[in-house]
Image (cartoon, rainbow, N blue to C red):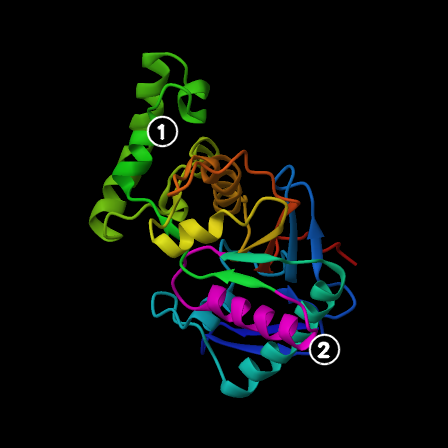
Amino acid sequence: MGINVNYETHEVEFTDAHENGVDTSLEHNPAIDTTTIPGITVYSVFQRNDAIQQDGNPLIYALKGSNEHGWSISDENRAKLTERIRAIVGMFCEKHPVDFTIVVPSGGGVNSMLRDILSEVLSEQDKENIILNNALEKMTVDEVEEEMFEKDSPFSQEFDTPEKKQRAWEKIKDSFARMRSENNGVFSYKMVRPPRYREWITKTLKFSDRTDIAEMASKLPGKNILIIDDTITFGNTIRSAANLIRDTISNIKYDVDTVGQFAPASISALTLLSVKQHVPRR
C-alpha cells in the first residue's frame, strides 16, 4: 500500500496497488529506527522509499497544503490516509508507554494532526498522556549563530582553530543571511547549505518561558517522553529537541528550588514519514 503521484496535476492519491513512494501498509509499520539518532528510537507511521527521487515527499507537501510546491490531496484520499495513520498509531500506543508528548514547532499542521490522533487513540485505550502544547520554540538565526560560536559547541569543537572556523562559516553564512531575509529570522535546518554542516549545529530549539510549561517540566523526570515531528531525514531537529529535554530542564528555576538532574525513563520520537528506505530492484 502506497501513494500514486501525478506529476502533471500535482495530485497525491492513496492506493492499495503498490508500495511506491510511501509504504503505508499495516504489515510493515510503524517503522523502527534506532540508528539515525543514537539513544533515541524513532517510530514512523509510514516508510518513504527511493521510488520517488527528490529531497522532500509529495505526500507531506500535499498534507501541509504547501503552495510553494503545489501538491494537493482530495478529501477522500486524506480521509483514507487519516484512517490508516490512526490504525498504525493505535498499534504503536498498544506497545509503547507515553506519559508526556512534546510537539516540535512546524508549519503546515502535520505535527498537530499526529498529536491529535495520538491523543485520541490514547484516550480510547484509557491511557493517560499529557501534551505540552507549544512547549518548544524555534530559535532565531542570531541565537543559533551565537550558540555555534560558543567555545564548547559541536561547531567550535569540529572547527577547532580560528582559521577552520572562519572557513566553515564562509561556507554557510549565506544560508544564515537567507534565513534572516526569507524566513523571518527564524532558524531552519532545511535552509542550511551545504547540508553536511547541519551535523554541527545542534541547538536550534528552546523551551517556552511560559509559567505553566516550567511547572509541568518539573514532572518530566522518570517519565516516558515522546517527541512528535512530521518527518526525519538526518534527525537534526529531533536530536536538538532531545538534547534540550535532557540538558536544559534541570536548569529551569522554580519558586521553591531548582529541579534536580533530569532523568527521563525514555525519550522516543514519532514521525509521519521515516528516513528514506532503499527499494531493492526486482
Percent across and percent down for residue 243 are 51, 38
Q: Are marks 1 and 2 in contact (CB under 8 Å)?
A: no
Identified by mark 2, the residue type is Ala
Residue 70 lies within the magenta run? no
Please name the residue shown 57% across and 70% down the image: 119
- Residue 35 x, y percent position in the rendering: 67, 40
Q: Nearer the viewer, residue 250 or 157?
A: 250
Residue 120 is labelled as none
Question: Disc 1 designates what residue?
Answer: 148
Residue 270: name its quadrant: bottom right
Q: CA distance from mark 1 to mark 2?
A: 47 Å
Mark 1 / mark 2, whichever is N-terminal: 2
Q: Which kind of residue does numbered mark 1 sit on?
A: Met
Residue 39's quadrant in the figure? top right
Along the viewing direction, whichever of 89 and 77 lies nearer the viewer: 89
Quarter of the image with the C terminus is: bottom right
> On the image, numbered disc 2 is attached to which residue?
17
The range drawn in magenta is: 103-128
Tag 1's secondary structure? helix
Horizontal side of 91 relative to 123 (left or right) equals right
Crowding at mark 2 (Cα within 10 Å: few <14, some 14-19, many 20+):
few
In percent of the image, x 45 and y 67: which residue is there?
61
